[in-house]
Image (cartoon, coloured by chain):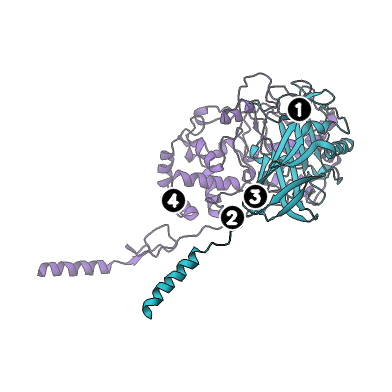
Chain colours: A purple, B cyan
Amino acid sequence: MKKICLLLTAIILISSCKKEGCTDELALNYDSGAEINNGTCEYHIATEYIINYPEGFPTPQIPINNPLTVEGVSLGEKLFNDPILSVDGTISCSSCHLKSSNFSDPNKTSIGFNGSEGFRNASTITNSIWSNSFNWDGSELTLESQAFEPVTNPNEMNNTWENVENILNSNDEYQRLFKLAFNIDYIDSVHVVKAISQYERSLVSFNSKFDKFYRGEGTLSSSELNGYAIFNSEKGDCFHCHGTMLFTDNLFHNNGLDSEEPFDDNGLGLVTNNPADYGKFKTPSLRNIEYSAPYMHDGRFSSLEEVINHYNDGGHYSSTVDPLMKKIGVGLELTNQEISDLIAFLKTLSDENFISKK
Amino acid sequence: MNNYKLPILLSLLILLTSCPKPEEKIKDSISIEFYNHVDESPLIFDSSGYSQWFSTLSNQNFNIYNLYYLVTDIKLTDNNGNTLKNLSDIHFVSSDNLNSNYIYLPEILRSGEYSNIEFVFGLNTDKNINNEYINEDFHNQMFWPEFMGGGYHYMKLEGKFNDESNFYATHTGGLNTVDYSITKSFPINIISSQNGSTHNIRISMNINNWYSNPNNITIDSDGIMGNAVLQQKLKENGDFNVFNAQNMND
């Protein structure tokens, strides 16, 4: 009996000597001297990231379970540019979505793991906060779900999410950043894509020469103004698909690229399995189009001149070509001067600060 | 004495609870169908996304791929001419979404006799404001370029004409601040008894009549948005006999 009493006393004495406090190194009040966690750890509360967008833009659609935070966007940017996500540490998101190319790929089709080639030109992600479908074929409905795919695609990063999670969880810096952004102790794939999506949603561009003109802060040249008029007339008829301040209707069209059916790429039809959707692709925004070459889903056109010539020549009839291609096979009959003016206008949509911003 | 109190109290309670309650009135509901047709044929799209081929009164063949339009300010009025209900501020009918052919307004009508229905095809000047509906699902599809006055298309009617390789786009809207919207009014007989019944109203649009009466319009591949003469002719045709409305319960 005496022995038990002594033992208990010893245990009480020993445990009472241990210092209590916050023992979590990721907490704001981490106490390196504490040995017993007394539940007082305090963590950083992520700061709301506010996007101030100008008049004429719709309210951005931000998922309620992934609000933008300063820490989340910053972490997303680091992940976006880090080849750590790929199996051999060579490919990052930014390998195919280059800032200098308006976050699209200057290659016709993107080059992924071990030099393997994708089958489409990488879509731009600029202003994707105002989009409700992603990829040329609309195969993903959220940025989060889109971000899951390239990591495991054998032609892109060729990795596994288990591998990515292991690597990130063994990285002290990422552990700290995920704690700051999401207050999590274990980094999982869901939070990786959440962070990347937050960064992508922060990529907003609305300060081009045209925007300044629209806001009454600048002027356009006579050539640019004439191009603006052609763009918004039914002669040029660009606006039906590339209208609004987003310069896209965010819808899917067959714009007469090919006449031969079956098409090499069925686009939206691959997603819906509806033959009526074969050959339809999502309308890209024309914002920063000057930087986004090459053009179309397969990067077939290397310049804006080639794009306009496609429409000016009339394009090609097929069973799913959009009725908005009213002059199919005939063409818009724009003069060289009008083409030149239209291109001049399109270049006013370039937001140089956005592209060059560090 | 106390022995009598309990039975009396119980009897009173039974009597009170067994009394019939005044009948609860449930307002009547309204269902509006936007019925799009070409003469006797309802507008139906096949697996290609196109309708069957039709023929205008001038014997020009056309089919339909897209039909989008905006209807605003649907109102019911009573026998005294008082507007009793502003049923719908703005409604987008889209051939991409068959549900858009219907508006259901549950428990909206009090007792009374309603003798007239009125609606506006398109948007009148008060409503046709640039970016006014920027967060609505039709904004991207229906906006009208500021360069042509801004606001919204009233209608986009698109398809093929003459043969498989010719496309047309009959797009109507207010051009450079001129209001081409069409206000239509039809007699209708709705008696609401507040018994929870649903009154089914059909607003019909005979697409063929856009191209005839009083003006014959030839369908071609030229855009018409900036064509004030054609916008006026389409307005006149729309005003003449494109639309109808009826109570389907009659």
Q: Nearer the viewer, residue B104 or A66?
A: B104
**Labelled disc at residue A175:** 4
Q: Nearer the viewer, mark 3 or mark 1?
A: 3
| Residue A243 drawn at (x, y percent) | 74, 40
Q: Nearer the viewer, mark 4 or mark 2?
A: 2
Cα gap from disc 4 to disc 2, whole angstroms: 21 Å
Q: Nearer the viewer, mark 2 or mark 1?
A: 1
Disc 3 + disc 1, Cβ < 8 Å: no
| Helix, strand or loop for disc 2 | loop
Which of the two labelled residues, at mark 4 and mark 1, occupies the earlier sequence position?
A: 4
Q: Which residue is mark 3?
A: B29
| Helix, strand or loop for disc 4 | helix
Q: Mark 1: which amino acid?
A: Tyr
Mark 1 belongs to which subunit?
A
Cα gap from disc 4 to disc 1, whole angstroms: 51 Å
Cα gap from disc 2 to disc 1, whole angstroms: 41 Å
Cα gap from disc 3 to disc 4, whole angstroms: 58 Å
Disc 3 + disc 4, Cβ < 8 Å: no
Does B216 appear above or below A71? above
Q: Which residue is mark 2?
A: A49
Q: Which residue is mark 1?
A: A311
Q: Residues within 10 Å of mark 2 (few under 14, many from 20)?
A: some
Q: Nearer the viewer, mark 2 or mark 3?
A: 3
| Residue A266 drawn at (x, y percent) | 61, 26
Discs 2 and 3 carry the same chain letter = no
Residue farthest along the top direction in this orientation? A260
| Helix, strand or loop for disc 1 | helix
Which of the two labelled residues, at mark 4 and mark 2, occupies the earlier sequence position?
A: 2
